[in-house]
């Protein structure tokens, strides 16, 4: 079962560390012989979902598109990694139901910490009302109720999160413990 594709879905607020952790996991899994593709939220918006705005309907459409591509990859033996905010629980659950093997990871980080580490200045602008529909500030983010795994990037570094996540994927049978792809 460990050689089958699956979807590793990262969700969390902007700047929480989804892309960082997704990149690290992808590199680790490739070194172990797995085929891996990462669908990063920013890249998907530029290429697959160009023209969509930030209304709830457009955000849901974006997440459904990412989910569909992940589903195609996973059923063809690829580990599909999504790193997108995916703010609404209902559409995340809809995507989950469409997958045979799905592993949701909640990348938690308190808003105060995100504002503190905000290199792009997006939170400052959103809090000042200069950016409308900013998830976690002027638009909602619905935390997962039953994610398979949670990391808190305000209290652990990326390497710690990676180690714990790889262990969880092994324990739950998504990847083999010995690193050899069966």
Image (tube, helix red, strand yellow):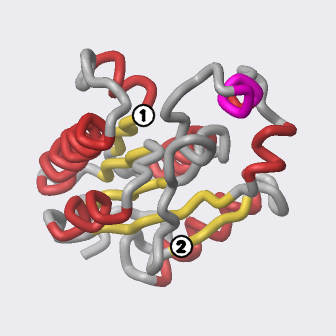
> Does residue 127 belong to the magenta stretch?
yes
Magenta stretch mostly in which secondary structure?
A: helix
Q: Secondary structure at mark 2?
A: strand
Residue for point 80% across, 54% down: 157
Residue for point 26% across, 35% down: 58
> Does residue 104 belong to the magenta stretch?
no
Displayed quadrant of residue 83 = top left
Displayed quadrant of residue 154 = bottom right
Q: Is residue 160 left or right of residue 38?
A: right
State the residue in front, 107 or 52. 52
Q: Which residues are magenta?
A: 124-128
Residue for point 32% across, 45% down: 35
Position of residue 148 measured from the top left corner of the image (x, y, whole percent) = 46, 76
Mark 2 and mark 1: span between their CA atoms? 20 Å
As displayed, is residue 134 above or below residue 128? Answer: below
Position of residue 44 measured from the top left corner of the image (x, y, whole percent) = 34, 27
């Amino acid at each position: 079962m460990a050689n089958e594709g699956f979807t590793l879905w990262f969700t969390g607020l902007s700047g929480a560390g989804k892309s960082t952790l997704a990149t690290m996991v992808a590199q680790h899994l490739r070194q172990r012989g797995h085929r891996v593709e990462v669908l990063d939220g920013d890249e998907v918006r530029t290429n697959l979902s160009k023209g969509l705005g930030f209304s709830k309907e457009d955000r849901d459409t974006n997440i459904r598109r990412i989910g569909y591509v992940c589903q195609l990859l996973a059923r063809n033996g690829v580990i599909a990694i999504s790193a997108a905010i995916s703010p609404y629980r209902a559409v995340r659950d809809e995507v989950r139901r469409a997958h045979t093997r799905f592993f949701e990871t909640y990348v938690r980080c308190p808003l105060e910490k995100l504002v503190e580490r905000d290199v792009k200045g997006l939170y400052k602008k959103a809090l000042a009302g200069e950016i409308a529909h900013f998830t976690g500030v002027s638009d909602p983010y619905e935390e997962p109720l039953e994610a398979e795994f949670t990391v808190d990037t305000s209290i652990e570094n990326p390497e710690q999160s990676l180690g714990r996540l790889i262990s969880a994927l092994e324990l739950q049978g998504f990847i083999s413990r010995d690193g050899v792809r069966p």
